[in-house]
Image (cartoon, rainbow, N blue to C red):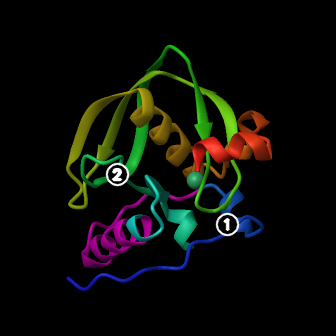
Amino acid sequence: MFMAIRNIVKDGDEILRQVCRPVTVFDEKLAQLLEDMAETMHQANGVGLAGPQVGIRRRVVVIDIGDGVMELVNPEFLSQKGTQECVEGCLSFPGEFGLTKRPKHVKVRAQDRHGKTFEFDADDFLANVCCHEFDHLDGIVFKMRVTRMLRDDELEKVR
Ligand code: NI
């Protein structure tokens, strides 16, 4: 399959604040979208990317925290436990980082590109990334979750 880099939607585009619709058709077009999203995320050195960030108002997410690409279609939380403080940024908000409080352990149910349902547990950073990306599907961006944004002198540590 030929993969293509897609344009990443930046803050200011209203699609980032809109609720996404579920995926109902599991076809070659969906497979292509997921391939493109993974390619786009890798090229931007991101760890996650959600449909609206490439202009698609559908409930699709790709994640790669270094263990390979996860494709999550229509993902949802089955449970959330504990809390952790996170430093978060977003490919749609280049150069901006903030502190958030997120659950430390989550259980997720999602579908794969063929529509098959699967479940997994995620802890720590992966739990954080799932929260951030799933929020995108409900039109919620990380700046709506931050306790505070990082200052310039703190930014140097996360870059
Ligand atoms: Ni984001």
Amino acid under label 2?
Asp
The image's mark for residue 64 is 2
- Image quarter for residue 18? bottom right
**Circles 1 and 2 in contact, beta carbons < 8 Å:** no
Tell me the residue at 71%/52% (across/down).
Answer: 96
Circle 1: element type: helix
Q: Is residue 36 magenta?
A: yes
- Amino acid type at mark 1: Ile
Q: Which residue is mark 1?
A: 15
Q: Nearer the viewer, residue 130 or 84?
A: 84
> Is 140 placed above or below 28 here?
above
Q: Nearer the viewer, residue 142 or 95?
A: 95
Q: Is residue 42 magenta?
A: no
Circle 2 crowding by C-alpha within 10 Å: few under 14, some 14–19, many from 20: some
Q: Is residue 40 above or below residue 144?
A: below
Answer yes or no: is residue 59 visible.
no
Q: Position of residue 86 (x, y in %)?
A: 58, 31
Q: Is residue 154 visible?
A: yes
Indicate which disc, 1 or 2, sits on the residue closer to the N terminus. 1
Q: Residue at x 63, y 62 (%)?
A: 92
In the depicted view, which residue is nearer to us: 31 or 104? 104
Does the beta carbon at disc 1 come under 8 Å from ligand 1?
no
Q: Residues within 10 Å of mark 1 (few under 14, many from 20)?
A: many
| Main SS class of the magenta portion in the image | helix
Q: Position of residue 49 (x, y in %)?
A: 47, 58
User: Which portion, as a residue range, is magenta?
Assistant: 20-41
From the viewer's perspective, is 112 left or right of 94? Answer: left
Does residue 106 sit above or below 109 in this rendering?
A: above
Label 1 vs label 2, nearer the camera: 2
